[in-house]
Amino acid sequence: MATEKRQRDVAAGRLPPEDYRRNFSDVHPPLDRHQALVEADRCYFCDDAPCMQACPTSIDIPLFIRQIATGNPKGSAETIFKSNILGGICARVCPTETLCEEVCVRNLAEEKPVKIGLLQRYATDSLIDADVQIFQRAAPSGKRVAVVGAGPAGLACAHSLARAGHEVTIYDARPKAGGLNEFGIAAYKAPENFAQREVDYILGIGGIAIETGKELGQDLSLQQLRQDFDAVFLGLGLGAVNALGLGEEAVEGVEDAVVQIAELRQAEDLASLPVGRNVVVVGGGMTAIDIAVQSKLLGAEQVTIVYRRGKAAMGASRYEQELAQVKGVKILHNAMPVAIESDGGVLSGVRFEYTRQSERGALEGTGEVFTLPADVAFKAIGQVSALDPDRLELDCVKGRIVVDEGGKTSLEGIWAGGDCVHGNRGLTVAAVEDGKVAARSIDRALSAAP
Amino acid sequence: MVDIRNDFVGIKSPNPFWLASAPPTDKAYNVVRAFKAGWGGVVWKTLGEDPPIVNVNGPRYGAIHAGDRRLIGFNNIELITDRPLDVNLREIKEVKRDWPDRAMIVSLMVPCEEAAWKKILPLVEDTGADGIELNFGCPHGMSERGMGSAVGQVPDYVEMVARWCKQNTRMPVIVKLTPNITDVRAPARAAKKGGADAVSLINTINSIVGVDLDKMAPEPNTDGKGTHGGYCGPAVKPIALNMVAEIARDPETAGLPISGIGGITDWRDAAEFMALGAGNVQVCTAAMTYGFRIVQDMIEGLKVWMADSGHERLDEVVGKAVPNVTDWQYLNLNYVVKARIDQDLCIKCGRCYAACEDTSHQAITTTKDGARHFEVVDEECVGCNLCVSVCPIENCIAMEELTEGIDPRTGRPIDRGYANWTTHPNNPAAKSAAE
C-alpha cells in the first residue's frame, strides 16, 4: 500500500481580514490625557520610592509621574530619558508587575499599583510622537567608538556616548536596527512600527552612524574594530536557540520560536503568514508566550504551551501567562517532551511525559505519557550564546562575556553589555542599563586618554 | 427618635439645610426642584431695585481643583438677580404658597438709604416670605456701587441698615456678613446692636482663582480682562468655622443666632458648624457641584450621626463645641503627645518621613533590621501632627497622650496638672500662681 506523505494542516489567511488588524493592535491601549491625569494623581510621591529602587535603570518614577500630574509631560519624558533613553519600549515590554509596579505602595493600600508602565508610555510617547529632542551633544571629543549590535544595550550605549561628544558607529548583522525590540517581541506589544520610530528618535541626537548587515566574525573583526576605533562596545545579544535534543532537526514542522517571531514582526501582510491548526509550544518564558499568543491570534485552533516545571517557575510573568490564557492558549505544567512524533519525516505530534521533582530536587519523569497532535511545534526553551569565546579571545562563562561593574571586558578597550554578558537578567531594561553604564565607563576611559 | 426639624429665629423648616442665596435660588424652577429634592429652605437670590443689574456675558465662575478634578474651591463674579423685581416677587409668593412647610427667606440688597429699604420691605412681606437676609457680603461688582461688602465692612452701616429693616418689617432679619474684614466680631456686634435677629456667615472671600498664563489674565476673564470674585467651596470652610466660632464665643454677641455658611458639603460639615454655634446651615457650592440630591445624604447622615451619638434634637448639638474654643494662651502646656504609626496600616510610602525629616523634627526613622519601616523617635517627636496630616491612610498615624513617666524629648516628668502660657516662666508677662 502506497503511503501518502502526511499533510500538515498549515495555512495562511485563516481569519477574515479585519481580524488581523484587531488582533495585532496595541495589547495595552495607551492612556489618553484624562486617564493619565487620573492615574498620575494616584501616585503618593513616596520617599526613596520602592518603584525607583526596583527599576534596573533607576528612573525617578515619582518625579516623572508628578510632572505628568502638573501638566509637564515634556519634563516627565526628560526625567525618564535621562535614566533610560529606551523608556518608550521599556514602557511597553517591561514586566512591570515584577519590577516597579510590584513594589508600589498602592499594592498595600488597595492591591492596585499605580500604572507606572502606562504612565511612562504616556510621557515618552508625547515626546517621541512630537519628535522633540531634549538632549544636546557635548563638544566633539574627537574620539570614535564602535558599537556592535543595535539592540537595546547598543542603542543606549551609543546614545549616551553621542551625548558625551563622541562619534559612534553601530554595526548590526540584521537588515534593521532595534535588536529584539524589532525582531524578538510580539507584534501587539509594539505596533505601528514603534521600534523603528524609537531608533530614529535615539539617532536624532546626531553623531551616530548605523551600518546594518555587518556581522561580527563575518564582515567585521574585533581586531580591526580595535584598530579603527578608540573603544568598542559589544551588545551582541544571543544567537542560537536551545535544541530539544529529540532529533527534531530532521522533522518538518518543528520550528524555532524566535525565528517565527521575527518573521511575523517583519511580515507586510499578516494574512500571508501560514499558521498550524494545532500548535504546540515547548517552553515557559516570554518567547513561549509570545509565539503561542501570536499563533492563536493568527487563527490557530489549538495552541498549547507545555512547560516542564510548575506555574511559579515559569519565566513568563503571571501577567503574561494570564494574557495567554485570556487569548485562548492552554498552558500545561509539569510535562517534558520525550519524543517528536512524525510520519515520513513530517511532524504529527509531540509526546510528553509528566514530571515531578525527585527528592534531590532534580526533575524526573513520572512514566505517565501523553501525545499532543501538532501541525507545528515551536521550541522556546531559551537562547544560548552564539559566541565563540576562543575566536573572540574574551573571558567568557558558559559562552557569555565576563565584564566588570563598568561593563569592561578582559580585553583592553572593549566593553560589553546586554544578553551576551554573563549574569545579565535577560530584560530589555537591564540591557539598557548595561549600555548606559558601559558608556559612562568608556567616556571616563576616553576622557583620561591623551 | 432623632428629630432634625429646625427652628431658626422662629422660621421653621423640616431640616436645617437651606440653600444659600446664590444662583441655585434665582428662580422658581430651581427652588421647586430643590424642595422636591428635600432642602429645608432657601434664601432666594438677592433682590435689588429695578431696573435689574446685568451680568457679564463672559464666564462667571472659576475653580480650584484637587486631584482627579475634585472641585475644592470656587469663585464667582455673578451679581445679584438680573431678573425684574416683580417677576421674582411673584415667583417667591407662588413657591411659598405651594411649599408652606419650607423656609423661604429673601435676600435683599438696595442702596444704603432708608427710603430704598422702606420701599422694598413691604413688597417682600407681601409674598408671605418667612424672613429676610441682608446681603452685606458680596465682595464683587455690587461693592463697587456702595452695596454688599462695602456695607458689611463698616459696622456703623450694618447697624444702621439692620435698624431700618427691623423698624420697617415684621419679618425676622438676618444679616449676612462678609469675611473680607479684619475682625468679624465688629459687624456681628453691630448687627446685634441694630436689632438683627441673626447673622449668617460667611459670604464669599475676595479672590483671584488663577491666572491664564497664555493670555496673562486672571481667571475667569472676559475679553482678556478679569476682576476679583468671591471665593467659596470646601476650601473656605476653615475660615468660616473660625468666624462662626469667634461670634459664638464673643460675650457681646453670645446667644445671637448664627446661620452657618462656607464650604458645607456633607452632614459632617454641617454638624461641625452647628457644634461651633450655627443654628442651621446654608449650602451653595456643593449643590452647584453635585446637584440638589446631595441633601439626601446630608439629612440621613446627620440623623444617623445624631442617633449614634445620642443627640435627639438639633438644640443638643448647637454650640456644643463652643466652650472648647479658647485662646492659645489657655492651652494646656503640660499635655504631651507622641505620634504612633500603626504598622499594620502603614503602606510604607515614607511621606511622614520626608515631611518630618525635611521640614520638621527628624523624628521618624526609615529602616528596621534592614527593611523599609517607619517609626517615631520619641526623643525627637514634638507631637506636631504633620505626619498625621500628610499620611495617605486614615488613622494609620495617631497622636497618643503620654500620661506618666518622662517625656523622652524634654527629659521632664509628665505632669498631668493644667498649666498654660499665662503662668509659664518663659512668659515675661506671666502672672505668678499666687496673684
Image (tube, coloured by chain):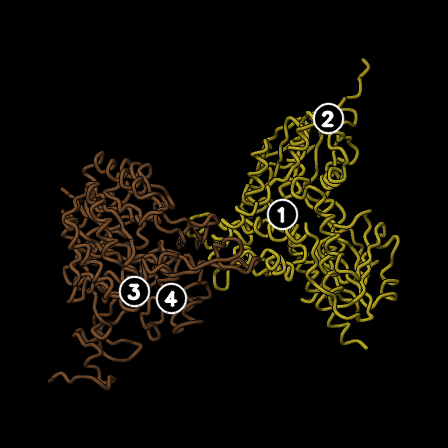
Chain colours: A yellow, B brown
In the image, A70: left or right of A284?
left
What is the secondary structure assignment of the residue under circle 3? loop
| Chain that bears disc 4 | B
Contact, mark 1 vs mark 3 (Cβ under 8 Å): no
The x and y percentages for residue B320 are: 17, 58
Quarter of the figure with residue A349: top right
Q: CA distance from mark 2 to mark 4?
A: 63 Å
Residue that appears at 74% across and 27% down: A12
Say which of marks 1 and 3 sits in front.
3
Question: Do the residues marked 3 and 4 share a common chain?
Answer: yes
| Chain that bears disc 3 | B
| Observer able to see residue B397 | yes
The x and y percentages for residue A129 are: 68, 49
- The residue indicated by pointer 2 is A13
What is the secondary structure assignment of the residue under circle 1? helix
Residue that appears at 76% across and 66% down: A410
Contact, mark 2 vs mark 4 (Cβ under 8 Å): no
- The residue indicated by pointer 3 is B153
In the image, A80: left or right of B159?
right
Residue that appears at 83% across and 51% down: A212
The three-letter amino acid code for the residue at tag 2 is Gly
The three-letter amino acid code for the residue at tag 4 is Glu
Say which of marks 3 and 4 sits in front.
3
Foreground: A126 or B419? Answer: A126
The three-letter amino acid code for the residue at tag 1 is Arg
Q: CA distance from mark 3 to mark 2?
A: 81 Å
Q: Residue furthest front?
A: B115
Quarter of the figure with residue A72: bottom right
Foreground: B376 or B318? Answer: B318
- The residue indicated by pointer 1 is A92
The three-letter amino acid code for the residue at tag 3 is Gln
- The residue indicated by pointer 4 is B375
